[in-house]
Amino acid sequence: MSGALRRVLTLAQELAEVTRLAEDDDVNAVLSRFVSRLAFTVPGVTEATITVRTADGAETVAAVELDRVGEAPAAIDPIAEALEYREPRRIDDTTTDQRWPAFSAHVAGRGYRSVLALPIPTRRSTAAVLTLFSDTPNQFGETAYDIVLLLTLHAGAVFDNAQLYHDSRGLVDQLRTALDTRQAIGQAQGLLMRHFGADADAGFQLLKRASQNTNSKLRQVAATLVSAHEQGDLGSALARFGLGDPDTTPVPAG
């Protein structure tokens, strides 16, 4: 097998691995595993990070060895520019490149000689940048650049898919909570109807009154009443919510 064919097959396998990362429901875990895979795949890469734009500025959310990278000085740097303009930035030699002097001095002091910052193309997520560091100057030539660019395109898909899955899980949880709340309110309403001999409208008004009496959410009142009924202590719960007993509590007109 030729070296070129072996490289293509290896890259194909790595892309397949990246795609499977989207099955993880934690976005940060997906990104951490991705940068580790990328550092293993691209020749000469010592460190890989993913930085996103937040309300408080740029934040690194994934890295192979974050302690070594450290926090660069608060100044315009290639990562910030890649986030801002959605364009790649490359430093061939941190000891001679003076476009971002504070950044270059910072990473050079940690042993990194070349840097490549690539914006991750995402549709659903915030702006994100993949940054590669190497201990070797001029590491990111055209061949390495093309490989990383291809992987970055897949990273965007992984980023979006992981976020979509996370959002979908959140929506499912919200719907489940809403259904549980509706069920609890219906059960509590039925308990009040039987206890006070009221119709459905009056039962719901009593539930609202209990909520207002204690400045509690309707679903919390309903859950408490259902739980108290199951424990044979409905009367005490009604008293705590200011409803008293059927003989002293006025029932709203239905």
Image (spheres, rainbow, N blue to C red):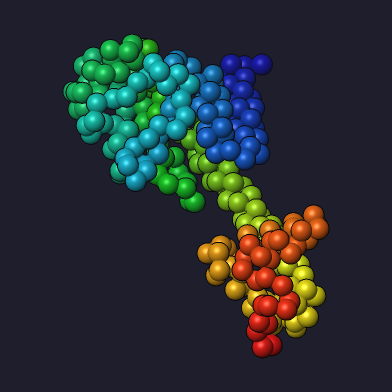
Q: Tell me: residue 41, above or below residue 84.
A: above
Q: Residue furthest front?
A: 248
For this view, does 238 lie left or right of residue 83? Answer: right
Residue 96 locus on image (x, y percent):
21, 16
Residue 92 locus on image (x, y percent):
30, 20
Residue 10 locus on image (x, y percent):
62, 23
- Seen at 61% across and 68% down, the residue is 242
For this view, does 186 lie left or right of residue 205? Answer: right
- Seen at 36% across and 27% down, the residue is 116
Q: Is 149 or 204 nearer to us in this picture?
A: 204
For this view, does 245 lie left or right of residue 158? Answer: right
- Seen at 62% across and 19% down, the residue is 6
User: Image quarter for residue 24?
Assistant: top right
Q: Is 228 or 28 nearer to us in this picture?
A: 228
Count all numbered tags in the image, as a single digit: 0
Inspect this view and state whether residue 144 appears.
no
Q: Tell me: residue 151, above or below residue 93.
A: below
Inspect this view and state whether residue 117 appears.
yes
Q: Is 216 or 63 nearer to us in this picture?
A: 216
Q: Quadrant of the C terminus?
A: bottom right
Q: Quadrant of the N terminus?
A: top right
Q: Is 228 or 105 nearer to us in this picture?
A: 228
User: Image quarter for residue 209?
Assistant: bottom right
Q: Tell me: residue 252, above or below residue 94.
A: below
- Seen at 78% across and 73% down, the residue is 195
Residue 198 locus on image (x, y percent):
75, 82
